[in-house]
Image: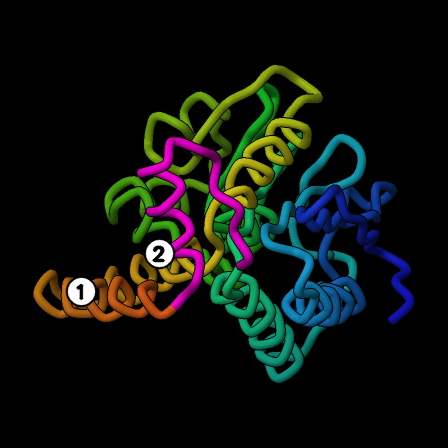
Amino acid sequence: MEFKYLTLSKDGNVGILTINRPEALNALNRSVLQELDAALDELANDKDVYVIVLTGEGKAFVAGADIAEMKDMTPEEAKEFAETGSRVFRKLETIDKPVIAAVNGYALGGGCELAMACDIIIAGEQAKFGQPEVGLGITPGFGGTQRLPRIVGTKIAKEMIFTGGTITAQEAQRIGLVNKIVPPNTSLQTAIEMAKTIASKGQVAVRNSKRAIDQGIETDIDEGVKVENQLFAKCFESVDQKEGMTAFIEKRKPNFKN
């Protein structure tokens, strides 16, 4: 598919997906969501891509959903828009490859929701996060009321959403929303470096680890441990398990087949 608002590139086994609508601070409209949906399918099916890095072109990661497009929506159109965004973000969240968000500026509203659907968030020092929707007379619509409390806790999530305030990268890291803060204009390179580290590991193990965390967190600890045990055992079906352990014993770098 030809993309108007996205760019796709690769650095080794790392797929780099860039939202490229800088004149609108990468705001999410129907077209961007449609392209993002297609790009995720392409990345999911690319056997040479082990890890995905998601970023935004220019001074924003994603400043939010496109208010100009939303302003005159009917309730029915708004519901369809929210369902589309939620479905695409859920596809991002459940893709079987790790996804790292490189947040280089504003991650507000839909942008914050997009980052939260990723597995790891690397933020530049200048990055800003928030769910300002109540100031527009609406709620978050792409999963913000659901993911934010799961990540930072109910009390902090309610404060952020009810006040519509914006927080710094430093505050986002303090409350557990952000993994790492890096100097300005280095979030993408840092994310790529981390992605390459992940890509160098046994990918059966990486993907099973993601599956175990995501499935286990939605249940109680006893059921979660069962999920982990099953996925741990499945690793022993792979040649990577034999290679990884043999390399450890032989004190050499493993040559994973993935």
Asked where in the image residue 191 lies, by quadrant, the reply is top right
134 vs 145, nearest the viewer = 145
* Mark 1 secondary-structure assignment: helix
**Quadrant of the drawing holding the N terminus:** bottom right
Q: Nearer the viewer, mark 1 or mark 2?
A: 2
Residue 132 in view (yes/no): no
Between 212 and 183, the one lying in front of the other is 212
Residue 68 sits in which quadrant?
A: bottom right
**Is any atom of residue 110 visible in this view?**
yes
Q: Can you tell which quarter of the image residue 85 is in?
A: bottom right
* Residue at the far bottom in the pictured view: 76
Q: State how far apart marks 1 and 2 are (Cα).
A: 12 Å
Earlier residue among tags 1 and 2: 2
- Where residue 13 sits in the image (x, y, percent)? 67, 48
- The image's colour scheme reads rainbow
Q: At which x and y percent is residue 171?
A: 41, 25
* Residue at left offset 66%, top offset 56%: 49
The segment highlighted magenta reads: 238-258
Q: Residue 239 colored magenta?
A: yes
**Mark carried by residue 224:** 1
- Tag 2's secondary structure? helix
Q: Which residue is drawn at 60% across and 54% down?
A: 50
Residue at the (35%, 70%) spot, across then down? 237
